[in-house]
């Protein structure tokens, strides 16, 4: 595990309980979806996983060691675990995309040449190299989203935390962004993303954690969890359509009981075609 949350508890000054004894494990070079409705504690968890917030009880483990909160430890922690907020306007501030993406590496002590190389690599990875000289305020929402992610990716973190990466994007934008993120995971990066979209989690996460009222109801292999109707009801989630098709086919003896279930709309439609 690269990251673990052990019994995290946290309440905001107004008394709102955001985390209530939360446990979570993040495997290295895996894709983990944090699934739950708004207000279930997903964002608050992310702010703990990169050291922005300190738990009132419990602890965050980094490489099986309790994380420390002194300045040097936090700086090292945030280089290893990058956080991208839901609204890209909360992160973009430099005049141009290239300057914004290169800011983190510069602040980390890289030379201008090294920072430029890091920024170029990140912009290439997010396919926004052609936007390097574009003013950040002139970007579309989807471009802002990718620029904000590139600014964190340029630091080459071991783990990338994304809060609601699909928010504000159309279906094509979501598909494009998630394909880019999948490619980063193939290169060894750990990806943790929060969402209330079970379809997105099914298609792009190796594991899922179901959230409810500041706790993890269950964590495990994504398809297995999203087949559990009782768990989904507790987490106020609906089973993805692709899984409904696969389970119905299995129940009717149209596919073997151990056959893999479809994890996206394309595979589900292909299964329906074979059944007709």
Image (spheres, rainbow, N blue to C red):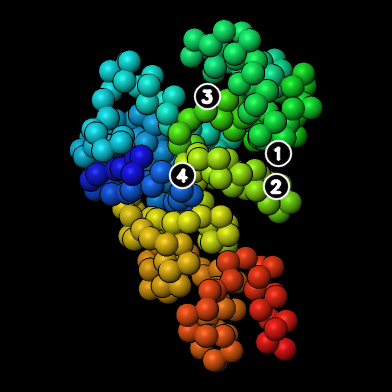
Q: How far apart are marks 3 and 4 (CA)?
A: 16 Å
- Residue 159 on image: x %, y %: 45, 36
Residue 142: which disc?
Answer: 1
Disc 2 from disc 3: Cα separation: 22 Å
Could you tell me which secondary element the residue under label 2 belongs to? helix
The residue singled out by tag 2 in the image is 176
Q: Mark 3 points at which residue?
A: 155
The answer to whether mark 4 and mark 1 are in CB contact below 8 A is: no
For the residues marked 2 and 1, what is the alpha-carbon distance in whole angstroms? 10 Å
Badge 1 element: helix
Image quadrant where one finds the C terminus: bottom right
Mark 4 to mark 2 CA distance (whole Å): 20 Å
Contact check, label 2 and label 1, Cβ < 8 Å: yes
Front position among marks 3 and 4: 4
Figure check: 101 above or below 203: above
Estimate the spatial distance between the alpha carbons at disc 3 and disc 1, rounded to whole Å.
21 Å
Q: Can residue 182 be seen in this view?
A: yes
Q: Which of marks 3 and 4 is nearer the N terminus?
A: 4
**Left or right for 33, reference 63:** right
Q: Quadrant of residue 127?
A: top right
The residue identified by callout 4 is 29
Q: Distance between the residues labelled 4 and 1?
A: 25 Å
Residue in the image at 68% along x and 28% along y: 123
Considering the numbered disc 4 on the image, is that residue within a helix, a strand or a loop? loop
Q: Which mark is residue 272?
A: none
């Amino acid at each position: 595990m690269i990251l673990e949350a052990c019994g995290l508890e946290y309440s905001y000054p107004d008394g709102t309980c955001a985390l209530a004894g939360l446990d979570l494990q993040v495997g290295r070079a895996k894709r983990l979806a944090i699934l739950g409705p708004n207000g279930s504690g997903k964002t608050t968890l992310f702010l703990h996983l990169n050291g922005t917030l300190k738990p009132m009880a419990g602890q965050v483990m980094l490489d099986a060691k309790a994380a420390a909160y002194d300045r040097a430890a936090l700086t090292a922690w945030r280089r290893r675990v990058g956080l991208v907020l839901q609204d890209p306007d909360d992160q973009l501030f430099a005049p141009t995309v290239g300057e914004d993406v290169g800011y983190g590496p510069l602040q980390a002590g890289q030379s201008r040449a090294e920072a430029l190389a890091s920024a170029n690599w990140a912009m290439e990875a997010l396919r926004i190299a052609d936007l390097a000289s574009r003013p950040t305020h002139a970007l579309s929402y989807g471009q802002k989203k990718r620029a904000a992610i590139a600014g964190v990716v340029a630091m080459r973190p071991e783990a990338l935390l994304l809060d609601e990466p699909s928010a504000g994007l159309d279906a094509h934008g979501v598909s494009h962004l998630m394909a880019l993120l999948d490619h980063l995971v193939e290169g060894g990066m750990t990806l943790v993303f929060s969402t209330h979209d079970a379809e997105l989690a099914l298609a792009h996460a190796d594991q899922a954690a179901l959230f409810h009222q500041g706790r993890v109801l269950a964590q495990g292999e994504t398809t297995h969890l999203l087949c559990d109707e009782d768990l989904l009801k507790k987490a106020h989630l609906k089973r993805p359509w692709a899984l409904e098709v696969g389970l119905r086919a299995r129940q009717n003896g149209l596919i073997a009981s151990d056959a893999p279930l479809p994890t996206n709309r394309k595979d589900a439609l292909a299964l329906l075609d074979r059944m007709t």
